[in-house]
Amino acid sequence: MLKLIILDFDGVIVESTDIKTEAFRKLFSDYPKHVHTIVEYHKKNAGVSRYEKFSYIYKNILKQPLDERKMAELGKRFSALVVEEIKACPLVPGTLKFLEKYSKRVRLFIASSTPEEELRHLVKARGLQKYFHGVYGAPSKKSEITLKIMKEENVKKKEVLFVGDSAADHAEARKAGVQFIGRVANLADCPFPEGVKTIRDLNELGAVVEELSCQ
């Protein structure tokens, strides 16, 4: 029986995927020869921490050194580009209905690659914190967060569902050994291997939860 649901934030709860893509484009606009490559790298690695991406971009694309001071500056600039927009962007269809219903039946958590302090600020600003028993972000990996929650909640792997929207989310769920559902807004851009169960939005997630709860 399903006892615990862990949801990613960007692309699962809020429609913020394009906001972050545009932030990478703006952040590296001073490198016009590389900006397309950088944006494509970001898109192919959705669900990965921005700081891991910064490290890769400087080492492998820009081929420039990146010290801690510059890393912190990039993080601050990125946050400035995205936070206010994410506060105002639409929720994924069906989000409030799903949270209202299922927060009363199972324990809900958020696991995201967004820095944890920023993530908690956004969840609170959107008025969503009341639905979740915990909100966790980077620098912890999503698999680490999932295993930590499972230990604290004393649940088995088969009693946990992870909902994500990226190949990285799927990989992290597999690493933790839990069930996974992929949110895919556009089936033409599905990032998951064949056989992974997907939903278009949270309107469809309820039916999946009901099915898993009966197993």
Image (spheres, grey):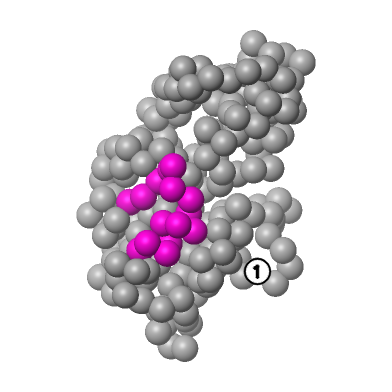
Q: Quadrant of the N terminus?
A: bottom left
Examine the rendered structure and indicate whether residue 20 appears above or below residue 183. above
Residue 165 picture quarter: bottom right
Image point (43%, 26%), residue name: 79
For the question of whether residue 8 can be seen, the reply is: no
- Point out the residue furthest to the left here: 130
Instruction: Estimate the x, y position of residue 108 in percent, counting from the top left.
Output: 33, 63
Q: For numbered disc 1, what is the local secondary structure?
A: loop
Is 55 contained in the magenta span?
no
62 vs 5, left or right, is right
**Residue segment shown in magenta:** 135-149
Q: Amino acid at mark 1?
A: Val
Is 142 contained in the magenta span?
yes
- Point out the residue furthest to the bottom here: 215
Q: Nearer the viewer, residue 193 or 206?
A: 193
Instruction: Estimate the x, y position of residue 61 in percent, counting from the top left.
Output: 73, 25
Q: Nearer the viewer, residue 13 or 35?
A: 35
Image point (35%, 59%), residue name: 109
Mark 1 residue crowding within 10 angstroms, few (<14) / some (14–19) / many (20+): few
Instruction: Estimate the x, y position of residue 169 in percent, counting from the top left.
Output: 56, 55
Q: Nearer the viewer, residue 23 or 15?
A: 23
Which residue position holds label 1?
A: 196
Examine the rendered structure and indicate whether residue 132 appears above or below residue 68. below
Image point (64%, 11%), residue name: 30
